[in-house]
Image: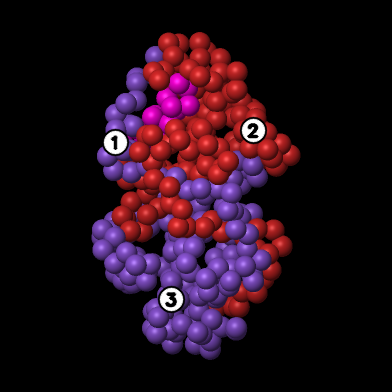
Chain colours: A purple, B red
Amino acid sequence: MSASEGLSIRPAVEEDVPQILEFIRALAKYEREPDAVSATAADLLRDGFGPNPYYWCLIAELDGIPAGFALCFYSYSTWLGRPGVYLEDLFVLPEMRGRGIGKALLRKVAAIAVEKDCPRLGWEVLDWNTPAIEFYRAMGADFLDTWRNVRMSGEALRRLAGDEEPAR
Amino acid sequence: MSASEGLSIRPAVEEDVPQILEFIRALAKYEREPDAVSATAADLLRDGFGPNPYYWCLIAELDGIPAGFALCFYSYSTWLGRPGVYLEDLFVLPEMRGRGIGKALLRKVAAIAVEKDCPRLGWEVLDWNTPAIEFYRAMGADFLDTWRNVRMSGEALRRLAGDEEPAR
């Protein structure tokens, strides 16, 4: 699928933060977790647009109208000795789909990874999202299914942190 | 298990880079990928100890002898609007195990996450590593098994990047 005429992809600027938050909320709804977003515009502004940003973001527009976004941070491969690009969110508004916008966003992220000499681009996909899985497989993506994702948060994280003994 | 007497955990400094590389190689061997490490000391120095480091690292020493390490970078949660800590590598030398060094490293990483107001600590575990999985579960970790890890690298990544159409 080739990208639509009238499509542009550009780095997000501070003024895009309210739109980014709308995209994040719409994506959470699509992922069946509509109440999971507690991020505020102030959070996104502080963390993405300061001197040492934690993330970076691309905005896709179709004829000047926001259509989707990609939000990334840098990972690190100790085997390769290079940062990688981690794609945390990729989303196109449902009414804007079928025009190649998602693939155009992914291409741009890949181009930035190559430009910055990041040898890996990683992301996650929900195991029930068969169309996305087939799409990624067709592009030559690998699925790292021998690895399980582990997370500590909330009370378990605080408990573990509180257990820490002072270095002697 | 309480940490051993004589154990200290400290942030890595530039002079630790050769030791960090040894730990990385030893971990790759444990993960059954002994030839996977192409990182050099120069890579690790550039990426971990410049003005905007891509990773940070803790060194565990027992009676002043290097025993293990933890290497992390910052992820980002768009749902929470906060960075998270991602634990890329955690390793204790085989001959130093059974003294609580791994848990002490993990505790210190958790303490740093809490101190920096990072609500999540994430990492991965190989699905055949049952002792580690049980250890993490006992600590209250969650396993995000509905998500599959996807990666593009090498020729597939370059091809995708090359496909990118200029923004119009």
Magenta segment includes B84: no
Q: Residue at x 42, y 25 (%)?
A: B104
Per the rendering, the mark at residue B72 is none
Residue B95: percent from the left, percent from the top?
A: 60, 18
Per the rendering, the mark at residue B30 is 2
Under mark 1, the amino acid is Arg
Q: Which residue is mark 1?
A: A158
Q: Nearer the viewer, mark 1 or mark 2?
A: 2
For disc 1, the chain is A
Q: Residue at x 32, y 55 (%)?
A: B81
Residue A71 position (above or below residue B71): below
Residue A134 position (above or below residue A156): below
Q: Residue at x 55, y 25 (%)?
A: B92
Q: Nearer the viewer, mark 3 or mark 1?
A: 1
For disc 3, the chain is A
Residue B52 at least partly seen = no
Numbered circles on residues, count: 3
For disc 2, the chain is B
Label 2 environment density (alpha carbons within 10 Å; few <14, some 14–19, many ≥20):
few
State which quadrant residue A117 falls in: bottom right
Magenta-tinted stretch: B100-115
Residue B10: percent from the left, percent from the top?
A: 45, 24
Per the rendering, the mark at residue A92 is 3
Q: Sequence order check: which comes first, mark 3 or mark 1?
A: 3
Q: Secondary structure at mark 3?
A: strand
Residue B133: percent from the left, percent from the top?
A: 48, 38
Q: Secondary structure at mark 1?
A: helix
In the shown orientation, is residue A132 left or right of residue B33? left
